[in-house]
Amino acid sequence: MNSSDYYTPAVATLVGLAVKLPGLVKDWRDPLVRSVCLVIALGGAGFFFAAPPTIDAVNEATGTANFSSPLVYGIISAFSAACLLLIVHWRGGPPAYVRRVSRRWQAGYALVVVMLVVLFVLGDAPVDRHTDFDTYYATTPFIREMIVLYLVAHMTAALVTTVLCWRWALQVSGWLRAGLWILVVGWLLNLAFSGLKMAAVAACWAGQDWGALSTTLAPALSAMSAPCATVGFLLPLVGPWVVYNWRAATTYRKLGPLWRELGGASPRTPLAGPIPWYSSPRVRLTQREAGVQDGLSLVAPWFDTEVRTRARSAALAEGHTGDEADRIGHAAMVAAAVRAVRRGLPVGSRLLPDHSEISAVRTAPVGVSAALRTSPIVAAARAGLATSPAEDDEARVSPAASPAEDGEKSPT
């Protein structure tokens, strides 16, 4: 494998850590949050310190041949323990049970890490091996036991985590289930990684050379497992947040036509105050919803139910459903009211607000907003092509239209 094959998954896991870091700062007392961050950090550290350039740098800096081997083995063992602890805290249960199981896994893998260091010190590995340490020293006393201990510990964690995630995935649904199945895939890849390494080591004991399994195929499987582990752990935590904000952003965009329409009633006075540019979609949506409510309150005295009725009838005549016609009628009423406000028309007796009409608009603002954008019936009401009752009254009392005056002029 190239160096990039190690550093790329390391960077990917660190990106995952950056995503979760704000949650760690906010909820650092939560064992689940700490476990997630620890898993991601140790996974990235494992790939970073297993890269050949890093191995060479660490060995040279410490002045000890193969010093990176127990370091990488220890990091991977700690990663295995962190994954087990995360599953235990994630699944939950009686607090006493969770604490007891967590302490057992912690103690077991802490002992593994200590034994790795002890066996390395007792053994003799004078020749630096960057990629084939496992097979090169597979028959060396104490180093051989260190390699086997590391592989058995890793395989145990992979097998237990796979079984736990598999069983749990069959009992849940949604984002959690998706994340667990991804973890199952990731840990099966980890199990295959350890299995191939162990097979290559066993082949050395039998005098065979299966080094390609350990130096080529196993690292490739490990590189694929890292993104699976990161995505699997983060998906149930980040997925709902992403969907929530996506829906907020979508609703914010859909309310745009209604926001702009109501804003036209009082161009010099914004419907809502400014908010920071970095505000979340939810905050932006809340601001827009509040502005829409204020705008509806502003134009409500000019709501004309007859405009709504005529627009609704026209929509039904065009083949719209009852719900669509209702939205078009309310949208036409809003557009006509905004036009009346801008023209400075007085509030007549038939234009007094009907609270049921106001409530209907406020409870379905997205549908009304869509009708404002797309309906030609609403566009006609906005342009004043449909005569309002107030304008009908003015026409009936206009001298130019008075039948009496026409009668007086006819004899002459």
Image: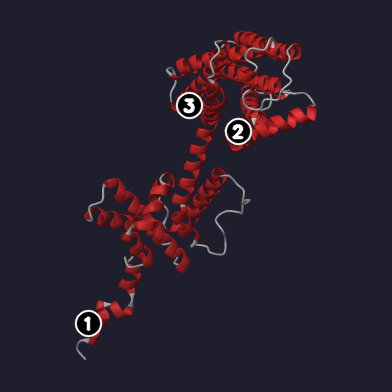
Residue drawn 49% across and 62% down? 264
**CA–CA distance in space, label 3 to label 2:** 21 Å
Residue ID at (39%, 57%): 373
Q: Is residue 50 visible?
A: yes
Q: Earlier in the sequence, mark 3 or mark 2?
A: 2
Secondary structure of residue under mark 2: helix
Identify the image quadrant of residue 218.
top right
Image vertical order of residue 137 relative to residue 265, above or below: above
Q: On screen, 133 above or below 267? A: above
Residue at which label 1 appears: 407
Percent position (x, y) of residue 302?
43, 59
User: Crowdedness of circle 1 by 10 Å Cα count: few (<14), some, many (20+)?
Assistant: few
Label 2 belongs to which residue? Answer: 6
Tag 3–tag 2 contact (CB < 8 Å): no
In the picture, the quarter occupied by the C terminus is bottom left
Looking at the image, do the residues carrying marks 1 and 3 touch, with CB atoms under 8 Å apart? Answer: no
Q: Position of residue 81 (x, y in %)?
A: 62, 17
Q: Amino acid at mark 3?
A: Ile
Going by the numbered disc 2, the residue's amino acid type is: Tyr
Q: Nearer the viewer, residue 149 or 283?
A: 149
- Percent position (x, y) of residue 24? 66, 30
Residue sticking out furthest to the bottom: 412
Q: Residue at x 36, y 65 (%)?
A: 390
Q: Quadrant of the N terminus?
A: top right
Work out whether mark 1 precedes mark 3 in sequence or the reverse, and give the earlier one: 3
Q: Which residue reaches farthest left?
A: 411
Residue hosting label 3: 182
| Mark closer to the observer (3, 2) | 2
Q: Position of residue 228 (x, y in %)?
A: 52, 29
